[in-house]
Image (spheres, rainbow, N blue to C red):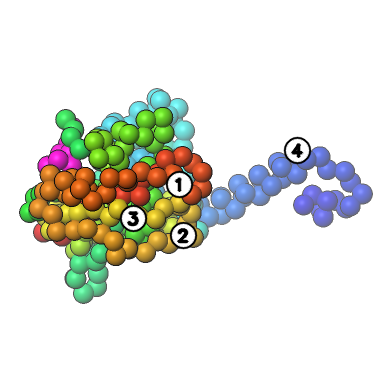
């Protein structure tokens, strides 16, 4: 780059090349920051910050599970870029409190122009029993789940990835996704009426992320013993299979069926990363 400016005869060190490239990036960021400050209203900027904070690994602070510790973070400005937008700001607890209010308000809107519910998916790894929240053993048709601000996806593959075993410690696979184990991959298939699509401002736009909250009533529970999975990349899309076994009324019925019909639910992943579980618990629900 510098050679073009000063001539091919001049020797430029790799360090100078790197410094020049970094300066160019900073100049571009400064231009983009100027655009968001000039063309977006204060409210629009706060909305962008709320979404980028939530999708940038700070969701637990916005949900109120933890408080923001400015001292631990060193008081450094946060930098976010999404969809050709660039922002930087130094947060405080008030920033996260404000973000929660904004996102809660956004999720009260109809998720489709017609007001009809949209099929959305959410993946998780859940315990059979827990002292902190209702475990899988409490599942039953008709039960109402109350969710705070929660991420869903329009893409079934994203839910598969978040419910996968291979990011858990592999030294004790029997504790996860075994018929006598305490941890399972779960895929929620929800019909959602209220929410907001934030994929255009998300830090991970390939997840096609949608935020929602509220009450959801379980309409069906079951399992899929044949969820195909390799380590996900944004380009991989897995279809919803026709191997789901549904129609159970509660967890005990579901577990008894798996014990009777699917004894071998653990396998080895095709990409050589060790044990993988191709069974998922399926929970269907609709927003009420």
Q: Is residue 202 positioned above or below 138 on the image?
A: below
How many numbered marks, from 0 up? 4
Give the label, 2 or 1, closer to the camera.
Answer: 1
Q: Earlier in the sequence, mark 3 or mark 1?
A: 3
Mark-to-mark CA distance, 4 and 2: 38 Å
Q: Nearer the viewer, mark 4 or mark 3?
A: 3
CA–CA distance in space, label 4 to label 1: 42 Å
Sequence-wise, the earlier of marks 4 and 3 is 4
Q: Are marks 3 and 1 in contact (CB under 8 Å)?
A: no
Viewer-proximal residue among 218 and 92: 218
Along the polypeptide, which appears first: circle 3 or circle 2? Answer: 3
Question: Which image quarter is the C terminus in?
Answer: bottom left
SS at mark 1 in the image: loop
Q: Residue at x 41, y 34 (%)?
A: 170
Region of the chain picked out in magenta, as a range:
132-138
Circle 3 packing at 10 Å, graded few (<14), some (14-19), many (20+), is: some
Quadrant location of residue 70? top left
Q: Are marks 4 and 1 in contact (CB under 8 Å)?
A: no
Measured in 3D between alpha carbons, the distance from the residue under mark 3 to the one under mark 2, in whole angstroms, is 17 Å
Furthest toward the right, the residue is: 9
Q: In the current view of this chain or complex, which residue is farthest to the top? A: 71
Residue closest to the eye, 64 or 221: 221
Residue placed at 25% from the left, 64% from the top? 119
**Label 2 vs label 1: CA separation?**
16 Å
Q: Which mark is residue 269?
A: 1
Asked if the magenta segment contains residue 73, the reply would be no
Q: Which mark is residue 226?
A: 3
Q: Nearer the viewer, mark 4 or mark 2?
A: 2
Mark 4–mark 3 CB contact (< 8 Å): no
The residue beneath circle 2 is 236
Choose mark 4 or mark 1, whichever is in front: 1
For label 4, the crowd category at 10 Å Cα-Cα, with few meaning under 14, some 14 to 19 and many 20 or more, is: few
């Amino acid at each position: 780059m510098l050679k073009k400016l000063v001539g091919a005869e001049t020797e430029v060190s790799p360090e100078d090349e790197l410094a020049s490239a970094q300066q160019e990036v900073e100049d571009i960021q400064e231009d983009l920051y100027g655009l968001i400050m000039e063309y977006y209203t204060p409210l629009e900027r706060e909305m962008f910050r709320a979404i980028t904070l939530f999708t940038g690994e700070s969701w637990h602070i916005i949900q109120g599970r933890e408080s923001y510790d400015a001292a631990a973070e060193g008081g450094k400005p946060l930098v976010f870029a999404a969809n050709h937008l660039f922002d930087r700001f130094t947060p405080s607890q008030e920033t996260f409190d404000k973000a929660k209010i904004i996102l809660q308000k956004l999720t009260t809107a109809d998720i489709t122009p017609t007001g009809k519910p949209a099929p959305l998916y959410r993946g998780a790894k859940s315990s059979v029993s827990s002292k902190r929240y209702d475990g899988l053993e409490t599942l039953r048709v008709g039960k109402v789940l109350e969710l705070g601000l929660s991420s869903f996806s329009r893409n079934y593959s994203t839910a598969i990835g978040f419910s996968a075993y291979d990011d858990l410690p592999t030294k004790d696979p029997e504790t996860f996704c075994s018929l006598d184990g305490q941890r399972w991959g779960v895929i929620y298939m929800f019909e959602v009426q209220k929410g907001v699509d934030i994929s255009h401002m998300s830090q991970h736009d390939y997840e096609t992320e949608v935020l929602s909250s509220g009450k959801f009533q379980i309409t069906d529970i079951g399992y899929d013993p044949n969820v195909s999975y390799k380590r996900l990349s944004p380009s991989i899309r897995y279809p919803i299979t026709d191997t789901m076994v549904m129609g159970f009324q509660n967890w005990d019925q579901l577990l008894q069926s798996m014990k009777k019909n699917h004894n071998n639910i653990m396998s080895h992943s095709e990409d050589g990363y060790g044990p993988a579980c191709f069974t998922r618990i399926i929970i269907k629900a609709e927003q009420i």
